[in-house]
Each structure stands twice: as C-alpha cells, then as structure tokens.
Image: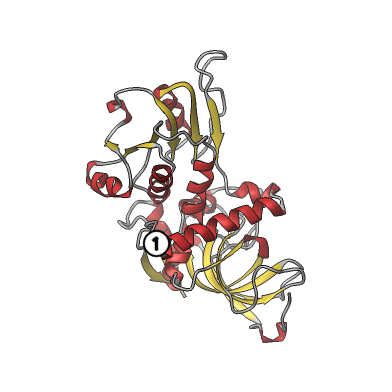
Amino acid sequence: MSTDHTTLPETFEAWTWTGPGEPEALTRERRALEAPGDQEVIVATRAIGLNPVDWKFIAMDSALWQAGQIPGVDAAGEVLACGAGVTHVAPGDRIAVHTTLAGPGSFATHLRLPARAVIPLPETIDWATAAAFPCPALTAWQAIEKLPVKPGKRLMITGASGSVGRWLVQLAAERGFRVIAIASTKRHEALRALGAQEVLETPEALSAPVFAVIDTVNGEHARRMTDHLGANGHIVCVQDRLEAAAAPAFGRALSQHEVALGALHQAGSDADWAELRQAGRTLLERVADGELTLLTPEIDDFAHLPQRLSELKHARVRPLKTVITL
C-alpha cells in the first residue's frame, strides 16, 4: 500500500538531544521530511505521551544516541503516507505508536516510523487518550502475560498507583488473581475501584507469602520483594531487572521475569508485532467501551514539552500522566 508522497510537507519541527543533560537542554529544530521507505509510514503527530523513560534517556550517555537524536517513544496521529509493503494501515487512518529509543522518536510534529509499530485507533478514542496509552498499557500487558493465570492466587503489585500500576491492577483482577496493591493511603479507594482486593501502604503488612510480585519501582526494590514470595513464586521486574538469582538453588524455586517493550524493536518477529498490535487494539477498544479505565491526562502544548518533561523528572507535577498536543 502506498500513496502520492508529493503531498507531504517538506519540513517538520522536533525537539532534539545534544548530549546527556536535563530536559530543558532539548533544542527545537526544523528538519527535512523524507518520504517513507519500505514498511514505513509518515504520521502527522496530534499528541505526544510523556514517560519516565524519556527523561532517563535524555540524561544518559548512551551508545544508542548521537547529537541530533529526537527523543520520545509514545504518540498518536494521522497516517499521511505509507511505503511499499504496508498493509494494516492506510493514509487517513488514526493511530497510536510506541516507537524505538534507538531511532527518531516522538517529540516531533511529523514521524517517520516502522509501520509494524503503529496501532489503529477506535474512532471514539481522542488523541490525548491515545498518546497516553502505549507505554504504560502495553508494559502492563507484557508484564501480566509473563505469569501463568491461576485464579485466586495472591498477586502483589508495587507502585500500584502509577500509570503502569493502575493498568496492572485492572488486568490482574480480570484474570482472577487476588490483587494486593501497594500504594499510599490517599490512593487506596481508587485502586479498590479498579479491582484491588487488598490495598496496603507497605509490603511488610502482608499476612502471608504471595504467588507473584510485579514490581514497578526498581531492581533493588524488586530484589527485596522476593522475600515475600512463596514456593514456585514469580517476580516480574518492570523497572530494571534482577542481575542475580533471587533465592538459592533448589530452595523456593523462584521464576524471574523482566519486561522491556524495546525488546520487540531489537528482536521482535512479524508475529510478535502482530500480537502486540492486536493486544493494543483490544485494550483501546475496551477503554472506548468503558470496560477499562485510563487516567485522564493533563495537557500542554508543544512549546512547553521540555518544561513538562522536567516537571515529570523532578516530581514537580501532580498528574500521573502528561500529554503534549499539537
């Protein structure tokens, strides 16, 4: 599937990275917009979702990035043009995308993307909701898919009041797990409404070992959470990973899992991508139908993107999700 590329704008604007530092160091530039290659699409960006991984990579001295890199992983927009071989979307389609950290990212007015990473949107999903969706929702879906479904088993979710955690509570509850959410007291009522059957301020308040823990905090925190696992338990790391075995051999026989959406960009097959797109589309349809709840994001404009990302990094912003609209 392809289209006449002469209708594309000649240039686009982007926030670009010049080296490790703070979000405020991003530079706004105008660049030439190239036609899509095979299996690529050009998207007019309508909204950009901000995520912690964005500011983390801006601060890093990564071999993935050179000066001029465009950061950002989440966006929603309209397909303008498709390269050869693209079959699941067409010009005019509304889409959401989670793109690779290693390539041109989402902090731009127009995106040139691998078509396999774009997810068609239900008509009733607005741009801001769509841009807030990919990273937290698909991360939560990947995390819950790591676990064997055992209804009634106790599953503890740490950092449950965050964007990923709220998705996890809903997905775990509908799979029949007894969900134990760890969060501050002011979030308890909201988490119960999402399906948590127990809500605690700290894991130390647990009354018995659990079958699984999904940790959204960091690797060291996840290691400590393994103390709460029973025999044949599971630890799923959403942030960082466990670099060593969590328990001695032939003891509790714990299973360790890590989650990284970027793994598909590095090594995902066409079948892997088709499965992720279908999962994303199904989740979005369920949001549209009111079956799943997605936080209403706070919205700002493209000119304020570095400032809002800095607020996210330094915890100077109250909303759990911020979206930039264009």
- In percent of width and height, residue 195 lies at 33, 45
Residue at image location 66% in from the left, 50% down from the top? 272
Q: Nearer the viewer, residue 190 or 99?
A: 190
* Observer able to see residue 194: yes
Q: The N terminus is located in which quarter?
A: bottom right
Q: Is residue 58 above or below residue 210?
A: below
Tell me where residue 11 sits by quadrant: bottom right
* Observer able to see residue 24: no
Callout 1: 10 Å neighbours few (<14), some, many (20+)? Answer: many
Residue at image location 46% in from the left, 33% down from the top? 150
Q: Residue furthest bottom?
A: 7
The structure's colour scheme is: secondary structure
- In percent of width and height, residue 188 lies at 25, 44
Residue at image location 52% in from the left, 34% down from the top? 148
Tag 1: amino acid: Thr
Q: How many marks?
A: 1
In this rendering, position of residue 81 left or right of residue 292? right
Q: Nearer the viewer, residue 297 or 250?
A: 250
Tell me where residue 324 sits by quadrant: bottom left
- In percent of width and height, residue 243 lies at 57, 28
Query: Is label 1 in a helix, a strand or a loop?
Result: strand
- In percent of width and height, residue 65 lies at 64, 54
State the residue position of label 1.
Answer: 322
Residue at image location 52% in from the left, 36% down from the top? 147
Q: Nearer the viewer, residue 37 or 308?
A: 37
